[in-house]
Image (tube, rainbow, N blue to C red):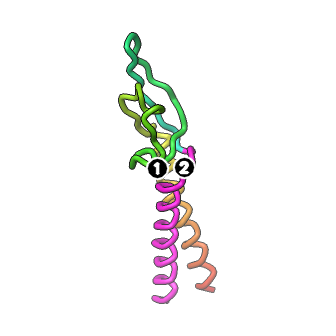
Amino acid sequence: MTSTKTKALAIFVVTSIVLGIIFFVAPIQLFDSQIHYVEPHRDYIVDAPLSLANYIGLYTDEASMEFVESYWLTPKGWFMVIAFIFGLPALLAYRIYLKSKK
């Protein structure tokens, strides 16, 4: 019984780490965000999907960030991050736990 829990926990941890690395390294613009632009005569916010790699400075160049003041994840974006990085591995680990329990 303990080995099935350990196996399921190991699968959860490894899958979470792998998905986290993929989402933080690959330029997959999937997560709902808002971008705050400040131009000389106007100030506005745009809804746009962003990659988590943008939040650690990957794949951002000076030309695309010229008037960007800041950017952040929306509540839906945070939900998607948690669902992909922790929810999917939890479902996979739970399925493996139930399958090996039989």
Figure check: 89 above or below 99: above
Find out whether the residues at labels 1 and 2 contact each other: C-beta distance under 8 Å: yes
Residue visible at 51% across and 78% down in the picture: 8
The quadrant the C terminus occupies is bottom right
Q: Secondary structure at mark 2?
A: loop
Figure check: 66 above or below 85: above
Query: For the residue carrying disc 1, how many other residues have a C-alpha within 10 Å: few (<14), some (14-19), or many (20+)?
Result: some
Query: For the residue carrying disc 2, how many other residues have a C-alpha within 10 Å: few (<14), some (14-19), or many (20+)?
Result: some
Is the stretch drawn in magenta largely helix, strand or loop? helix
52 inside magenta stretch: no
Task: Give the Cα separation between the discs numbered 1 and 2.
Answer: 6 Å
Q: Residue furthest top?
A: 41
> Please, what is the three-letter code of the amino acid marked with disc 1?
Ala
Image: magenta residue range? 1-30
Mark 1 highlights which residue? 53
> Please, what is the three-letter code of the amino acid marked with disc 2?
Pro
Across and down, in percent, residue 58 comes to 44, 49
- The circle drawn on residue 79 is none
Across and down, in percent, residue 28 comes to 57, 49
Among numbered discs 1 and 2, the one appearing first in the sequence: 2
Mark 2 highlights which residue? 27
Residue visible at 48% across and 36% down in the picture: 33
- Between residue 39 and residue 35, name the one nearer to us: 39
> Is 100 left, or right, of 2 in this rendering?
right
Quarter of the image where one finds residue 94:
bottom right
Residue visible at 48% across and 73% down in the picture: 14
Across and down, in percent, residue 36 comes to 41, 27
Q: Secondary structure at mark 1?
A: helix
